[in-house]
């Protein structure tokens, strides 16, 4: 009774193998991303880049490190890792590019009956990035990577990834939801009723039980609520998990932009009229068309290309240098 009629039909006419109740995190994801898909007019961009200069630069530096020392120090090993795994480079390059296109590093308050809609362009560039764990995907926040060296960015990313995999996201997002519920009640936001009901239902009847293995991990080695809140833009690095060209992402409201990075691979590329093998990646972006017109986003792609063509701008950047 009171069930979706299409679901009721399928239950009656299809053999069911297993029924699994959505846990708390899946309920939150379903609620917020369904809301995003309904209310946010998504526009997508797909850009393919030749990143051969980046790969070649990394190889040159790696060879210099290896040939310059009989025994590599821990610092040398870390530097080698940065020049082989480009995740930190990509996040920092995106942050630098967002610095030059502030309309994309923003969040929107679209309440036409109250204020007609407001766009808040942010001075802070707080990038959340996806980390796949055995419990699901977690989005820790890397704060202002455009103001830090690549070594600092890589070190912070490594710490956030480690803590993400030592954290029970059910408990973490339950605490984060409680924080949002407090704000929703204070602001008398009717739009928060759905999230409030999910939280109340979890509190009263379906409260997630802590994972015993996670409970034994010291608190300081886990993510805190403030580690996953306050993002101004999100990056999904799908290329770290599967061999995929691209992913079309759903924006996490109230952000106005979400990026997806494909895998780095050799592909045919035309250079001076000749087809040659080049290292490429595909960068996708989902834009909230209420916040800006697509033309305002065009400079972003040019800035990204500038950093890919001259990777030393990111690898050797120091505080005080031009962004």
Image (cartoon, rainbow, N blue to C red):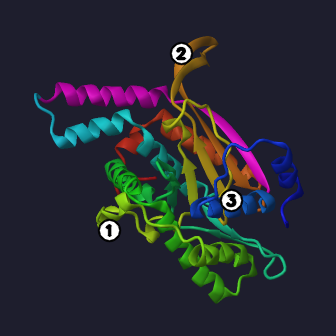
The location of residue 196, given as percent across then percent down, is 66, 77
Q: Nearer the viewer, mark 3 or mark 2?
A: 3
Q: Residue at x 34, y 44 (%)?
A: 316
The location of residue 36, given as percent across then percent down, is 73, 60
- Badges 2 and 1: C-beta atoms under 8 Å apart? no
User: Would you name the residue on which mark 2 appears?
Assistant: 277
Q: Earlier in the sequence, mark 2 or mark 1?
A: 1
Q: Nearer the viewer, mark 2 or mark 1?
A: 1
Q: Residue at x 10, y 28 (%)?
A: 70
Helix, strand or loop for disc 3? helix
Q: Residue at x 50, y 51 (%)?
A: 96
Tell me the distance, in whole angstroms, between the alpha carbons under discs 1 and 3.
28 Å
Find out whether residue 51 is within the magenta segment. yes
Mark identifier at residue 219: 1
State the residue in front, 96 or 249: 249
Range shown magenta: 41-69
The location of residue 62, given as percent across then percent down, is 28, 29
Mark 2 surroundings: few (<14), some (14-19) or many (≥20) residues within 10 A: some
Mark identifier at residue 30: 3
State the residue in front, 235 or 228: 228
């Amino acid at each position: 009774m009171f069930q979706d009629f299409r679901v009721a039909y399928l239950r009656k006419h299809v053999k069911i193998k297993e029924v699994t109740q959505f846990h708390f995190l899946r309920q939150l994801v379903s609620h917020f991303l369904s809301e995003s898909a309904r209310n946010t007019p998504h526009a997508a961009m797909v850009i393919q880049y030749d990143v051969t200069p980046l790969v070649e630069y990394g190889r040159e530096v790696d060879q210099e490190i290896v040939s310059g020392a009989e025994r590599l120090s821990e610092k040398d090993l870390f530097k080698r890792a940065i020049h082989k795994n480009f995740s930190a480079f990509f996040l920092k390059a995106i942050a630098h590019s967002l610095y030059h296109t502030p309309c994309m590093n923003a969040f929107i308050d679209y309440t036409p009956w109250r204020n007609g809609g407001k766009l808040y362009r942010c001075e802070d560039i707080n990038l959340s990035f996806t980390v796949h764990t055995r419990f699901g995907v977690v989005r820790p926040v890397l704060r202002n990577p455009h103001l830090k060296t690549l070594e600092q960015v890589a070190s912070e990313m490594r710490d956030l990834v480690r803590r993400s995999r030592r954290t029970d996201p059910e408990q973490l997002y339950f605490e984060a939801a409680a924080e949002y519920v407090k704000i929703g009640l204070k602001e008398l936001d009717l739009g928060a009723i759905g999230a409030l009901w999910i939280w109340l239902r979890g509190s009263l009847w379906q409260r997630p039980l802590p994972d015993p293995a996670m409970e034994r991990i010291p608190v300081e080695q886990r993510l805190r609520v403030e580690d996953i809140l306050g993002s101004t833009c999100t990056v999904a690095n799908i290329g770290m998990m599967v061999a995929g060209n691209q992913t079309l992402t759903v924006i996490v409201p109230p952000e106005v932009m979400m990026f997806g990075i494909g895998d780095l691979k050799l592909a045919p590329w035309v250079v001076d009229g000749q087809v040659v093998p080049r290292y490429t990646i595909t960068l996708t972006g989902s834009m909230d068309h209420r916040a800006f017109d697509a033309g305002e986003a065009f400079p972003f792609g040019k800035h990204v290309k500038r950093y890919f063509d001259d990777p030393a701008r990111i690898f050797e950047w120091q505080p005080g240098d031009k962004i």
